[in-house]
Image (cartoon, rainbow, N blue to C red):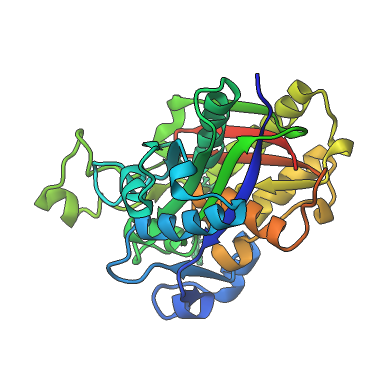
Amino acid sequence: MKKVGIIGVGEYLPEKVLTNADLEKMVDTSDEWITTRTGIKKRHLAAKGQATSDLAIRAAKAALEDAGLKPEDIDLIIVATITADMPFPSVASIVQNALSARNAAAFDVSAACAGFVYALSIARQFISQGTYKHALVIGAEKLSSVTDWKDRNTCVLFGDGAGACVLGETKSGGIISTYLGCDGSNLGLLNIPAGGSRLPASHETVDNRMHYIKMQGNELFKIAVKTMTEAAQIVLKQAGLSFKDVDMVVPHQANSRIIMAVAKKLGLTEDKIYLNIDRCGNMSSASTVTALVEAVKEGKIKKGDRVLLDCFGAGLVWGACVIEW
Ligand code: COA
């Protein structure tokens, strides 16, 4: 088995920014409520006509440049997303074409907010077995396209963006351990009810606003804290490490109170946790990867550091990963 590491990173956040003050003009909310309940101050929104693949392509190009590789060096493209441009083909196919990555197989992964860690785990397997040499793993979302801008319970939470990593063989360190899980019994707590084969789009589904994200936030909150705590403990145990060995935790960015509750349970101090939720909101599959990219670019993750990724989302699904940078 080859050691697999992240050898290039990139991100793209759309130019348009929506602040809490802007939201105060749209729904019955306040900057104070959003900040204290979620930690979010602003979020990026894709432009009209900009699709998820457009964000993914920008992040992918940045990651390729960072890795010093050409598109033809990539054998595999995996895009984690729940907001594909269309039901099919995949965003990954669109990215493959846009990059002219003619040697790459390409597919999407749907695991909501844990999507990036799922995609990372899959790509790691392919490279460690020698099937592929270089993989592009992207988390990209245009959640603004499925957000109900009349629902204050949800519209204050989400944003758009994309992050990408290039994976390849490494001599030392790399991805040490991954852990994925699912409990489908609670899928009603967070979903988009219509638009699939169960309830195809109709006048009725549109009139009933069933193409937007529906969420039971406070139920999810409790499950998220418990699940992310357990996932972090399991993946570290698998790696033969303890929390003292971790230099930086990059969690899924759904709510800063969830993250701090997990940190408290695990005995982690705030300086070991990277957050971008204040300026990006929750970008589902794109959250963990953009936070990882930003932490690297800001020098908060350095060579030799041990990084813990810890995610939870709709499904319900979860994923954690330990990487030596
Ligand atoms: N502005 C002002 N008030 C709001 C509001 C908003 N944007 N959204 C909800 N409220 C109100 C509610 O109507 C409720 O009022 P009521 O008590 O009069 O009924 C009150 O605030 C409390 O609502 P509640 O849902 O209990 O708040 P909360 O503290 O649980 O925070 C979330 C709501 C959504 C921020 C929080 O539950 C959360 O982050 N949940 C987890 C999200 C998650 O993990 N998602 C899955 C991973 S992506």
* Relative horizontal placement of residue 125, taking residue 18 as reference (left or right): right
Residue at 85% x, 41% y is 267
Q: Percent position (x, y) of residue 227? A: 63, 33
Nearer to me, 213 or 250: 250
Position of 113 relative to 275 (above/below): above
Q: Quadrant of the C terminus?
A: top right
Q: Quadrant of the N terminus?
A: top right
* Relative horizontal placement of residue 87, taking residue 284 as reference (left or right): left
Q: Percent position (x, y) of residue 150? A: 34, 66
* Relative horizontal placement of residue 79, taking residue 198 as reference (left or right): right
* Image-quadrant location for residue 296: bottom right
Residue at 44% x, 26% y is 184
* Relative horizontal placement of residue 251, taking residue 156 as reference (left or right): right
Q: Percent position (x, y) of residue 51? A: 32, 60
* Image-quadrant location for residue 48: bottom left
Position of 40 relative to 306 (above/below): below
Residue at 48% x, 48% y is 139
* Image-quadrant location for residue 255: bottom right
Q: Percent position (x, y) of residue 87? A: 24, 43
